[in-house]
Image (tube, grey):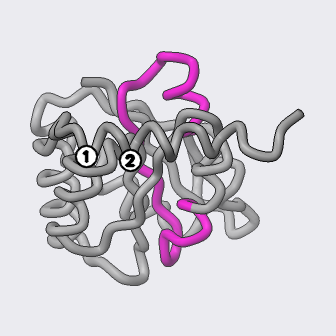
């Protein structure tokens, strides 16, 4: 499993911690930036990098971290094929994968600490899409929304 991990300045330190945590578990995590802490870093740039990594097949899943996770989630969801979920608890993390087939996890560094972030990421990575007909039906409807308003 290949995981793209990005952040803005507010999520920089939690990103660095989670990259080490993922590596210690033998998971292939790619840091898509930023490389250094810069208060001018904006979450849309790195949410896009995470999302495009999935879109281009360079990663299977993504994790994006900003101050609340909200902006990152909004930005990542603008990229076709991305289903980003903002999760600050393990129940939402598990459900986002099992029911919604989320492929990007967004976290708020000002909301969750390192320990909880590890738990959320661990549960999210272990969960998988249920494939239940009701969830497949809903996912198809969500994917049709990507083309809504075009043409």
Pick the front one: 76 or 64: 76
Magenta range is: 50-73
Q: CA distance from mark 1 to mark 2?
A: 6 Å
Q: Residue at x 41, y 58 (%)?
A: 85
Judge left or right: residue 135 versus residue 94. right
Residue 97: x, y in percent? 25, 48
Q: Where, by quadrant of the figure, is residue 8 drawn?
A: bottom right
- Label 2 Cα crowd, 10 Å radius (few <14 / some 14-19 / many 20+): few
Residue 135: x, y in percent? 27, 45
Q: Secondary structure at mark 2?
A: helix
Q: Are marks 1 and 2 in contact (CB under 8 Å)?
A: yes
Q: Residue at x 49, y 28 (%)?
A: 54
Residue 70: x, y in percent? 54, 72
Pick the front one: 58 or 73: 73
Residue 30 disc label: none
Q: Where, by quadrant of the figure, is residue 60 drawn?
A: top left
Q: Secondary structure at mark 1?
A: helix
* Residue 129 lies within the magenta run: no
Q: Quadrant of the N terminus?
A: top left
Residue 16: x, y in percent? 37, 53
The image shows residue 51, relative to residue 76, as above or below, that is above
Which residue is tagged 1?
134
Q: Residue at x 54, y 60 (%)?
A: 73
Q: Residue at x 43, y 35 (%)?
A: 4
Which residue is tagged 2?
138
Q: Quadrant of the C terminus?
A: top right
- Label 1 Cα crowd, 10 Å radius (few <14 / some 14-19 / many 20+): few
């Amino acid at each position: 499993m290949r995981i793209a991990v990005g952040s803005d300045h507010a999520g920089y330190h939690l990103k660095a911690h989670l990259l080490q945590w993922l590596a210690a578990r033998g998971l292939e995590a790619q840091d898509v930036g930023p490389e250094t802490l810069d208060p001018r870093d904006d979450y849309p740039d790195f949410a896009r990098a995470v999302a495009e990594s999935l879109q281009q097949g360079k990663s299977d899943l993504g994790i994006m971290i900003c101050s609340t996770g909200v902006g990152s989630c909004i930005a990542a969801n603008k990229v076709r094929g991305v289903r980003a979920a903002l999760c600050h608890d393990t129940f939402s993390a598990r459900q986002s994968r099992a029911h919604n087939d989320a492929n990007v996890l967004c976290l708020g560094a000002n909301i969750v600490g390192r320990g909880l972030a590890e738990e959320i990421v661990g549960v999210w990575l272990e969960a998988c899409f249920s494939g239940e007909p009701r969830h497949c039906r809903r996912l198809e409807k969500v994917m049709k929304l990507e083309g809504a308003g075009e043409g």
